[in-house]
Image (cartoon, grey):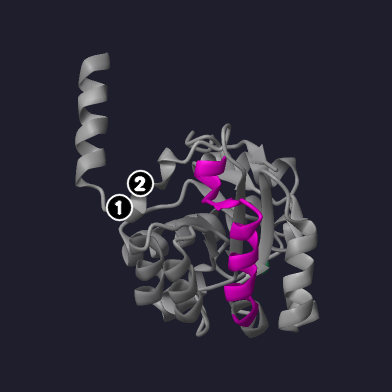
Amino acid sequence: MVIHALLAASLAMTSMPATALQARVDCARVKCLALTFDDGPGTTTPALLKILGKAGAKATFFLVGKQVEKRPEIAAQVVKQGHAIGNHTYSHASLPTLRDDEILEELKVTQEVIGQATGQQPTMFRPPYGHTDERVLGLADEANLAQVLWTATTLDWQLRDAKKIKAAVLRLAGRDGVILMHDTVPATVKAMPEIVTELKKRGYHLVTVPTLLRGKRPQSGVSYF
Ligand code: NI
């Protein structure tokens, strides 16, 4: 049984493209940071993907179902480049204000939409506005989703200025941190080349949330960060 699992794992590894091998980064040994981008895919997402690709950086994208329906090919591109994806609800709703069946609908429809676009269903979700409670977490468990929050938010949507956003990220960055940004904010994308360069200079490995969790699969119904 164990041997079969190991064999399957090694076979899976060899068939994986180089970009997907980031799980090998051991955040127990090196300095890691997870950049996360919410609310896309948007019109500015392809430019961000190009910047991250050039830098060899991996990130996590919390996708809005409605946006994935508009731009399925960009969602597919995110996965193809080895980034992690999460569910950010279908309509970017404040979940605690909804009934149980409405919350499940927001999560489950988005799982389907993302699965259709990318061939992959998320194991993580992030509640819009960070609005959540025990009821939401329990329903997320029913939808097989772990909740992923953040350690620091840049408020990039409020700053809307590349220099200020860069300063905020560099101030908030810390080992094993999870930084919240938005790929739909043009100034964030504009700031990203310098942010990535500076973070790498400071010794950070820019990794996905699952890699930050030491390669463990996020557990359904558990809240992280
Ligand atoms: Ni959001």
Viewer-nearest residue: 48 or 5:
48
Hey, which residue is sitting farthest front in the picture?
201
Q: Which mark is residue 223?
A: none
Look at 41% across and 79% down and name the residue there: 71
- Tell me where residue 127 appears, x and y as whole percent: 66, 56
Q: Name the residue under label 2.
A: 21
Instruction: Identify the amino acid type marked 1.
Output: Ala
Q: Give the range drawn in magenta.
A: 190-212
**Image quadrant containing the N terminus:** top left
- Tell me where residue 97 appears, x and y as whole percent: 75, 60
Q: Is residue 55 visible?
A: yes
Q: Is residue 99 magenta?
A: no
Location of residue 165 (image quadrant): bottom right
- Tell me where residue 2 appears, x and y as whole percent: 27, 15
Q: Is residue 199 magenta?
A: yes
- Ligand 1 sits in which quadrant? bottom right
Instruction: Identify the amino acid type marked 2.
Output: Leu
Crowding at dot 2, Cα within 10 Å, few <14 / some 14-19 / many 20+, comes out as: few
Q: Residue 18 carries which label?
A: 1
User: How many numbered marks does the figure carry?
Assistant: 2
Look at 41% across and 47% down and name the residue there: 22
Q: Locate residue 39 relative to residue 14 in the image: left or right.
A: right
- Tell me where residue 51 appears, x and y as whole percent: 49, 74
For the residues labelled 2 and 1, the Cα–Cα distance comes to 5 Å
Look at 71% across and 63% down and name the residue there: 94
Viewer-nearest residue: 159 or 222:
159
- Secondary structure of the residue carrying tag 1 is helix
Q: Are marks 2 and 1 in contact (CB under 8 Å)?
A: yes
Q: In this view, does 198 lie above or below 101?
A: below
Q: Main secondary structure of the magenta part?
A: helix
**Image quadrant containing the C terminus:** top right
